[in-house]
Image (cartoon, rainbow, N blue to C red):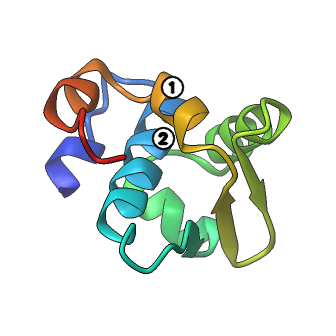
Amino acid sequence: MYALINRSYENTVVRICDLLYMYCSESQNTGSNTLHISQIILRGIIGASHAQIERALRYLREKGIISTSKTEIIVLSTDLLLEECSETLKLTDRSAF
């Protein structure tokens, strides 16, 4: 999973979306689209700076894809989220939802 997310040639938005989509795919049985994670930990997983993470999360909030708090990210629309994901993930996981 980490190798799929941490592709430095893809932009931060795509990497975050891939992470969130994979999380939602794994947790679909529980019905939870809430990822309990701080931005500091997210930066480490994604391999991006504070500013890059902030811009990416703002973009996703403005598009109505996520909402955020200090320690969680809630996916509001998996359909919109998938549109922002990498082509690799779209081809790999078409049937998750």
Q: Residue at x 79, y 40 (%)?
A: 58
Please tell me in which quadrant of the rendered image residue 7 appears.
top left
Residue type (three-letter) at the residue carrying disc 2: Cys
> Residue 12: x percent and y percent?
50, 34
Q: Residue at x 70, y 42 (%)?
A: 51
State whether residue 71 is above or below residue 83: below
State whether residue 82 is above or below residue 34: above
Please tell me in which quadrant of the rendered image residue 55 appears.
top right
Which one is nearer the viewer's eye here, 48 or 92?
92
Q: Is residue 55 left or right of residue 86?
A: right
Q: Secondary structure at mark 1?
A: helix
Q: Is residue 87 left or right of residue 71?
A: left
Question: Is mark 1 in CB contact (under 8 Å) with mark 2?
Answer: yes
Q: Label 1 belongs to which residue?
A: 84
Q: Residue at x 33, y 57 (%)?
A: 25
Distance from disc 1 to disc 2, alpha carbons, whole Å, reads 6 Å
Q: Quadrant of the N terminus?
A: bottom left
Which one is nearer the viewer's eye here, 94 or 84?
94
Q: Which mark is residue 17?
A: 2
Neighbourhood count class around disc 1 (C-alpha, 10 Å): few under 14, some 14–19, many 20 upward? some
> Residue 27: x percent and y percent?
38, 72
> Residue 26: x percent and y percent?
30, 66
Neighbourhood count class around disc 2 (C-alpha, 10 Å): few under 14, some 14–19, many 20 upward? many
Residue type (three-letter) at the residue carrying disc 1: Glu
State whether residue 60 is above or below residue 36: above
> Residue 45: x percent and y percent?
38, 60
Q: Secondary structure at mark 2?
A: helix
